[in-house]
Amino acid sequence: MTSMAATLTTVRIPTFRNLRRSHAHQRPVNKHFNSLLTFAKMEGSEITEQVDEDSRAKKKIFVAGATGSTGKRIVEQLLAKGFAVKAGVRDVEKARTTLSSPNPSLQIVKADVTEGSDKLAQVIGDDSEAVICATGFRPGWDLLAPWKVDNFGTVNLVEACRKRNVNRFILISSILVNGAAMGQLLNPAYIFLNVFGLTLVAKLQAENYIRKSGINYTIIRPGGLRNDPPTGNVVMEPEDTLYAGSISRDQVAEVAVEALAYPEASYKVVEIVSRPDAPKRSYHDLFGSIRQRSLD
Ligand SMILES: NC(=O)c1ccc[n+]([C@@H]2O[C@H](COP(=O)([O-])OP(=O)(O)OC[C@H]3O[C@@H](n4cnc5c(N)ncnc54)[C@H](OP(=O)(O)O)[C@@H]3O)[C@@H](O)[C@H]2O)c1
């Protein structure tokens, strides 16, 4: 994983709200901060907000599922990189103990994604630049939970973004969501995960909704998640490529946070695992190597 000292010197924060698809495609956006200023000026009316060093700490990211094993890592990494974070959680009291010690850049808000887009739009507010969704149903007696959380919950978040004009959405999904189309119907992981309320199917539905929404998305599909620190480098592949492998949650969080910084991550679905023998590649290179594909 990139050391924090190194990443702090190269933090890149585009104005997500205004980075429209056409420009993400066509403009050679230099990712260094000073060049971003130039880009903001170049785009004239499209970019209403000037970015400078001082406003860097004020970029606020809404994280749904912030108390989750991946969500809390995303929160920690965002804070470490100087973002402000609005942490969406179901249980605010629990979140106070799960998340970082009191930090003026961290705001904890109640956000149950099953409660509808209006409520979510309210908590996302008008100060969030982007939304990162790291929710996942918690196993229990409710067999519809995956459908409610991983499909409709995510759809609610996308709708809330539309209501608030938030035009950047990053979703933590999963490899094998499209396993049926990949010929992986008999893959034990595909079977196992779908036994619990068609989890992968639910996630795929949500992915498709995001892709058709017009919002600037990055859908991150990790392999099996591990809590231990990274043991190898990130391998990034296009959608419907990987059907096995695992990755540290630290690296998944890093990919989600880095996706905010790189225009090359826009409108893409990326599948990630880590491998000890994989070469270390920059995120510019990793995201840049994935082609955009539209839904048929
Ligand atoms: N486990 C794997 O190997 C694996 C592999 C690939 C992809 N994934 C996917 O990666 C994502 C992150 O996984 P993880 O293991 O880090 O997650 P996790 O620890 O299970 O955390 C899930 C989060 O979702 C939240 N959540 C559940 N229902 C919610 C609701 N109705 N409204 C708002 N938040 C809700 C939980 O809140 P509470 O803390 O309040 O319960 C928790 O913060 C999930 O989508 C998962 O399916 C997992």
Image: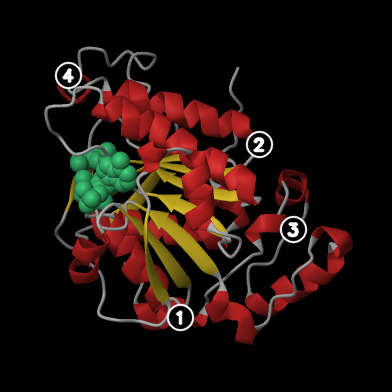
In the rendered view, tell whether residue 228 sits above or below residue 290: below
Local crowd at mark 3 within 10 Å, few (<14), some, or many (≥20)?
few
The kind of secondary structure element at disc 4 is: helix
Image coordinates of residue 59 in percent, x first then y, are 56, 71
Q: Helix or strand or loop: what does disc 2 sit on?
A: loop
Q: Which residue is mark 2?
A: 214
Mark nearest the camera among 2 and 1 is 2
Disc 2, ligand 1: is the CB inside 8 Å? no
Image point (38%, 42%), residue name: 113
> Is mark 2 in CB contact (under 8 Å) with mark 1?
no
Q: Judge the density around disc 4: few (<14), some (14-19), many (≥20) Cα neighbours within 10 Å.
A: few
The residue sitting at 15% across, 56% down in the picture is: 227
- Dot 1: element: helix
Cα–Cα span, label 2 and label 1: 31 Å
Asked whether residue 216 appears in the rendered view, the answer is yes
Residue 57's place in the image compared with 241, above or below, is below
- Pointer 1 residue: 8
Find residue 251 and report its horizontal and vertical position in percent: 31, 58
Which mark identifies residue 195?
Answer: 4
Q: Amino acid at mark 4?
A: Val
Disc 3 target residue: 28
